[in-house]
Amino acid sequence: MTEWVPDERIAALKVPTPPGWTDVALADLHGTMSDHAHAEKKAALSALSLMSKEPSRTALVGRMAKLAREELRHLDQVLGHLRARGWELRRDLPDRYAARLLSLRRRDGPAALVDRLLCAALIEARSWERLNLLGEALEADLGVFYAELARSEAGHYRLFVELAAQECPGEDVQARLARLADAEADIIASLPHEARIH
Amino acid sequence: MTEWVPDERIAALKVPTPPGWTDVALADLHGTMSDHAHAEKKAALSALSLMSKEPSRTALVGRMAKLAREELRHLDQVLGHLRARGWELRRDLPDRYAARLLSLRRRDGPAALVDRLLCAALIEARSWERLNLLGEALEADLGVFYAELARSEAGHYRLFVELAAQECPGEDVQARLARLADAEADIIASLPHEARIH
């Protein structure tokens, strides 16, 4: 079996999305897009929560505010595509993928911030990979939309890894990232395919 | 004593901000602006929470997503003004004003949605009034900023009142608004002046 080499923009990921996810996601595109809308919202909420937790880290605060704005711009765009198809937003469902990854983070001291940033980096990387898969699989306006969205989200993984290095200079960011990425790969392998971003 | 007539853009408010608040707010402008940044963030969070609670109300969902974007644009702007002065964002403090107003809302059935929308309308109205006071009291770039901000926020009160009428046609929106506005006036009168938006 050939080893998977991730796109450099999501370099930390250890495994690709398993074959079959895209078919499930496309079979209920309404569900997938609705979940995607909530995923953009939750990414904004997570950035704002990080900002609130670390108010004195001015660089981080500024980056998170801008990131949250970008995620809400994407939310607005997904909602527009849902409306154009006459599809209601569905209820937000708990995100087992993110919850399991975040449950592994350390809670105290500088390690807590590193882990939070690196979990965010991995979630962004995985989201990017899947938006890209949708962009490749879909046609017409939705194909263009998802391909453009993936392009615009591509820097988020790197943003979080860089912030971890800048804000927590005493931590071994790369070693911790590799370890959390191993865990992320296990989570991806163990979750069933659903019509959701993850 | 002459009766106070509120600006038509915040028509429901029963009392003006008591004299003295502006002096306290200006005496610790760093604190006031930091609180203002968090207030914009909390307004965005509230809009996103309402969106999540009522996913099938497509018009409301779209309005809340756009409102949240606008609030985060303002957050970004306030953070820029803080940075320009070398002022860190301070810790977010509980908002006793909003908590007390929201504690009065009914929790079940269509009344819950009406009350949530009307509380949001009153909070927006009060915020607008105070941003306007800051715009009048401040000079140079900050005076311009707050005056422009107030202009751009002026429609939010009306947005929430209109949504209440549209989404809950069986409710007496005006009567309930007047009643909540009485309560809001009592809360405003009872809280001490602080270097905060409210």
Image (cartoon, coloured by chain):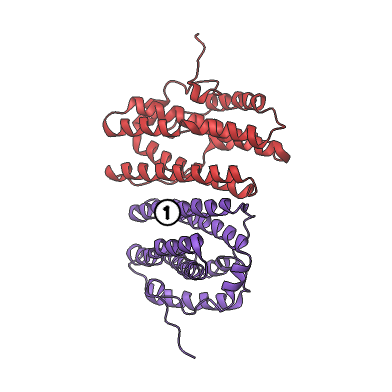
Chain colours: A purple, B red
In this picture, residue B70 sits left or right of residue B175: left
**Residue A152 pos. (x, y %):** 40, 61
Figure check: B168 above or below A18 = above
Image quadrant where residue B113 sits: top right
**Residue B91 pos. (x, y %):** 43, 46
| Residue A103 seen in the figure | yes
Q: Looking at the image, which residue sits at the far bottom?
A: A1
Amino acid carrying mark 1 in the image: Glu
| Residue B50 seen in the figure | no
Count of residue discs:
1
Residue drawn at the location 45% of the way across and 87% of the way down:
A3
Figure check: A31 above or below B156 = below
Q: Which residue is mark 1?
A: A70
Residue drawn at the location 61% of the way across and 51% of the way down:
A86
> Depth check: B30 or A72 in front?
A72
Q: Looking at the image, which residue sits at the far top?
A: B1
> Depth check: B91 or A150 in front?
A150
Q: Looking at the image, which residue sits at the far front?
A: A140
Image quadrant where residue B141 sits: top left
Which quadrant: the C terminus of chain A?
A: bottom right
Q: Tag 1, which chain?
A: A
Residue drawn at the location 47% of the way across and 23% of the way down:
B17
- Considering the numbered disc 1 on the image, is that residue within a helix, a strand or a loop? helix
In this picture, residue A86 sits left or right of residue A15: right
> Depth check: B1 or A17 in front?
A17
**Residue A77 pos. (x, y %):** 49, 53
Figure check: B196 above or below A80 = above
Image quadrant where residue B181 sits: top right
Mark 1, Cα crowd under 10 Å, few <14 / some 14-19 / many 20+, is some
**Residue A33 pos. (x, y %):** 57, 60
In this picture, residue A121 sits left or right of residue B123: left
